[in-house]
Every structure is written in C-alpha cells, then in structure tokens.
Image: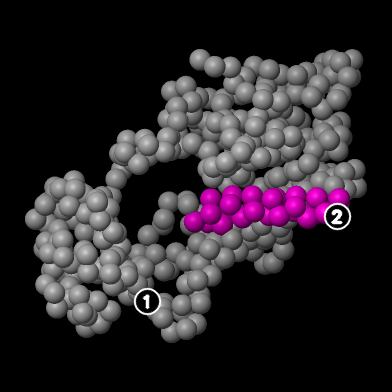
Amino acid sequence: MSTPPTAADKTGPLAGLRLIEMAGLGPVPLAALMLSEMGADVLRIERADAKEPLLSLPEAHDLDRHGRSILRLDLKRPDGAELLLRLAEKADVLIEGFRPGVMERLGLGPDVVLEGNPALIYGRLTGFGQDGPLSRRAGHDITYLAYAGLLHAVGRQGAPPVPPLNLVADQGGGAMMLIAGVLAALFQRSRTGKGQVIDAAMVEGASMLAAPIHAFMAAGLWSERRGENLLDSGAPFYDVYEAADGRHIAIGCLEPQFFAEFARLLPLDRRFVGSQYDRTSWPDMRAAIAARIREKTRDEWAEVFGPTDACVAPVLSLTEARDHPQSRARQNFARSRELERPTPAPRFSSAASTLAAAPTVADRRPSAVLARFGIDETEIEALVRSGLFGR
C-alpha cells in the first residue's frame, strides 16, 4: 500500500493553504475533508477530553478525520487557548461549527484571532446564524429544513413530509455554503490582503438552494400544497414507479421531446403526448404509466430506456451505484484501505485532488504537528510534559 500523502505532496488547487478545523459533527468536517482533498493542509483541533461521538466509526471509515493532522488540545486551559492563537497566526483559514458564543468564551472569537492574524479567513457555520431569536438553539438537518419551509415541500400528496436524509441543510446548505464562503473570501483576500468572518447558517443556505422554487411560487407556477407540483411527484412524468420485481424506475421526462420518446418506448397512448401539461389528463396518465411499468422488471426497463434521452433511470441502491458502468468508467469511487467511498469532487484539469487517508501516527503526534507550525523542539517538549494534549 502506498504511503499516505504529506502536506508537501498535495497537488490540488489549494496546495499550500493551511486550515485549522475545530472538531465537530456533520457539515464542518465534510467541508474540511473536501478542502483537504483540494490540497489544503488541514489541522483538526479536538478536545483533549473528547468522548466518542454518537455514531462512532472505525478509523478506516472515519472521514471526519481523514486527510488531516490531529491535535487533541485542552482549550479550557489558558495555555491551550494561547497555543491555538499562535497556530492561527500561521494559518490561512479557521472553520468552526459551535453555537454562537462558544469560541468567544474560550478566548478564541474572531476579534481576538483576527487581531493576531488580520489575513485569516474565519469561517463560522451554525444552524441559524450568529444572531436572531433562534441563534442559540440546538438542531439538526430536519430542524433547519422545517424552519426553512423545505421539509413541508418534500413528500407526496396526502402524506407527511419526508426527511431527505441530511443532504439538504447539513451538507448542501451547510458544508457547501461554508466552502463557497471560504473560497470567495480567499479571492477577496488575494486582492486586499485582509481576512474576514464568514457567518454561514444552514437554514439560510438551505433556503438559498430553494431560491428557484420561491421564484416559481411568486410567478404562480408552484403551489404550497405538497405533491401537486412539477418536481415534487405531482406530475406523472416526474415521479418514481414500481416495476414488476418490486424495484423502482425514476421518470423525469419534463421536456416535450423527451416525453414523446418516453411515450413511444413505453408505449403510452399517443393522446397523452399532446396533453402532457394538461393537468386534467394527469390522473389517467399516471395510471397508464404505472400499469405499463409493472409489466417489466427494473433492469428490463433500464435496457429499454438506457440508450435514449427519455430521462428514465433505474433507482439504484448505494451499493449498486458504485458498480454502475458510468461510475466505473469515471472512477467515481475509490478504495481507501477497506473503505470504498466517492472520489474527490469536483475534478480539476491541472491540479489533481488527493484522496484523503486515515491520519498516520505522525499526524497525531503533537511534536510532529507543532514542528510544522514553526514551534521549536524545546518548547514542544515542555508543552507535552505539561499535560496540555490528550491522547
């Protein structure tokens, strides 16, 4: 097995960028992982007395730690906070996902940190933002989707809302918006030399993802009634149907030319082709499509529609998706020891990303980590003897 890459070996577009990640759960670790795989040298600061998380993973599967060096530091001690301030002076970016006020109580708020390093990008990610009546409330993806109005919109007519995993608020509205903020702030710093604070909130990021839906609603093209719209299972040509084997087919032929191809291959009565957007025809159209789909298995339909632009796809499981010919052709999944996981995205033409690996012994050794930040050996030995670091 090849040796895991060091910071100097990274070739991504962010190679040479130094980032401090304050350990937490959910979207901040995903953002740190992605930035690491884009080339950033990431130091993850964990609590010296940190307990096992709710979902504890073996090291080989723990992507919250892959691609980083790790320092378990007692930040409640004044010398612990002082050390982190010194590390931040040598960093380009710091990201944290604590509730408002936590970093300030540790003496590590943005005002203090930016005083020591005015060029630092200080990224903050919370559920509701740094202020407002809900800012200090706990929550999870489902909480933020509920407040954003998006949970109400996901589901079928006459059925309760359905949580879309934790992809929309946590990862889309959280991690992706934090990354976008960091990259935008880095660009501005390249012109001004000054850092800044990013206030990213998952409820706001999730709302931004739904900006086109708000525009549709304002234009009278979208109803707040769940399961009655073009993209929420209301339209029979944008929905999921059960095949003969109990598995499912996803149909998404929105455009008339794609719907015509779908109708030809299914086949569907030609009268529906001319009335695709006539809502009065939708109940009969849905029943006709459902009856046809039940005549073949999922994979048989995949063979029928695979070579076409009818926008029909087999609903694959997560395991099946890894083995699909498109995934294999593009090498969309890679193996990191016993873990097979998605490869870094997006791809760059002239700066290959680095697949993150589990931290090595050196990545966890305080002496090795601190030496990279320019702290001399004598001081490192004294810090280690002081009991400042956890194991």
**Image quadrant occupied by the C terminus:** top right
What kind of element bears circle 2?
helix
Residue at the spot 46% in from the left edge and 37% down from the top edge: 342
Graded by Cα atoms within 10 Å as few (under 14), some (14 to 19) or many (20 or more), the crowding at tag 2 reads few
Which of the two discs, 1 and 2, sits closer to the camera?
Answer: 2
The residue carrying mark 2 is 192
Q: Would you say 285 lies left or right of 153 here?
A: left
Image coordinates for residue 239, horizontal then vertical, percent: 28, 63
Image coordinates for residue 302, horizontal then vertical, percent: 21, 49
Residue 375 visible in rendering = yes
Residue at the spot 17% in from the left edge and 73% down from the top edge: 285
Q: Residue furthest left?
A: 295
- Residue 186: say if magenta: yes
Q: Quadrant of residue 367?
A: top right
Q: Please tell me whether residue 133 is drawn above or below residue 21 in the rendered image.
A: below
Q: Residue furthest front?
A: 350
Image coordinates for residue 133, horizontal then vertical, percent: 67, 67
Task: Indicate the amino acid at tag 2.
Answer: Thr
- Magenta stretch: helix, strand or loop mostly: helix
Q: Nearer the viewer, residue 2 or 135?
A: 2
Q: Would you say 35 lies left or right of 57 here?
A: right
Q: Of the numbered discs in the image, which one, if any, rests on residue 40?
A: none
For the record, the magenta segment spans 168-197
Residue at the spot 28% in from the left edge and 59% down from the top edge: 309
Task: Indicate the amino acid at tag 1.
Answer: Arg
Q: How many marks?
A: 2
Q: Nearer the viewer, residue 209 or 23?
A: 209
Q: Nearer the viewer, residue 119 or 109?
A: 119
Image coordinates for residue 211, horizontal then vertical, percent: 53, 70
The residue carrying mark 1 is 225
Q: How is the image coloured?
A: one colour
